[in-house]
Amino acid sequence: MEQCALSARDAGVFADFHVVADAPISHCQCYRAQENPAADGLEALVYLKGGFSRLHQDYAVWIAPETRFLRPPHDLLSLLRASPIHVPLRAASRRPSDERGDDDGPRFEAAMRKGGVRNAIHQAAPAICIIRMSAMDAVFRLACEFAAVARASGLTPSLSNTLAYVMQMLCANPDKHRVQASPNIWLPVRDAWNLTPARRVGRRDLILGFDPSGYMEGDPALVSTLCYETTP
């Protein structure tokens, strides 16, 4: 997280980074982490709900610690598209489980259907998550409900699968939050690394976001390590 904050400062981003950690981190406002067995894989949401309620902010923006800033982002809230939450989505994989190397795909889809999702199922790649704080209680409640459904379906609850569920329950049109719906947002990371400083000046704001889940695998022109580009 320190490298993320340093890259932000180098890029001219001076917003506060609020981090839950077990040791101080430079350029971040740190809060002591506490064991919470009841979090059940949803620690990030637990801390968001508890911590940001004390900060009295209108929106919470969570980013993966592996994120690297290249330029200052602006107008991130436009990604909400009038929804209370934004998490980048992609269509669920249709490859057989033996080709994916796991069996979570069918369990994920079964849990989503059991939880009440009726439209096309999407997976989430939460390299970034934006939540309107007035909706935090609803987000947390839905996440906990899906965690229970997931366990009953043999699926381990995670930030990725719970946020995918919450997105599809709270957003009228999840397709608007797919990476393909904003072609100027997501780029292959290899293109970002190849940008020289002079060429970066002509680009819109860039953030490097790493998605360790690998959920982006299979999308055309996208890889699991992504470059996030904000709109002007």
Image: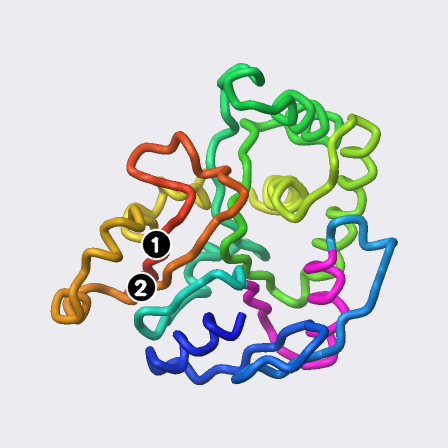
Callout 1 environment at 10 Å: few (<14), some (14 to 19), or many (20+)? many
Q: Is residue 171 above or below residue 5?
A: above
Helix, strand or loop at disc 1?
Answer: strand
Question: Could you classify mark 2 by the number of other residues whose Cα lies within 10 Å: few (under 14), some (14-19), or many (20 or more)?
Answer: many
Image coordinates of residue 104 in percent, x first then y, are 65, 27
Disc 1 target residue: 227
Find the magenta span and give its range: 43-62
Quarter of the figure that contains the N terminus: bottom right
Q: Identity of the amino acid at label 1?
A: Cys
Report which residue position mark 2 lands on: 206
Q: Residue at x 64, y 22 (%)?
A: 103
Residue 232 colored magenta?
no
Q: Give the number of the disc on residue 109.
A: none
Quadrant where the image shows the C terminus = bottom left
- Secondary structure beneath dot 2 equals strand
Residues at marks 2 and 1, CA–CA distance in whole angstroms? 7 Å
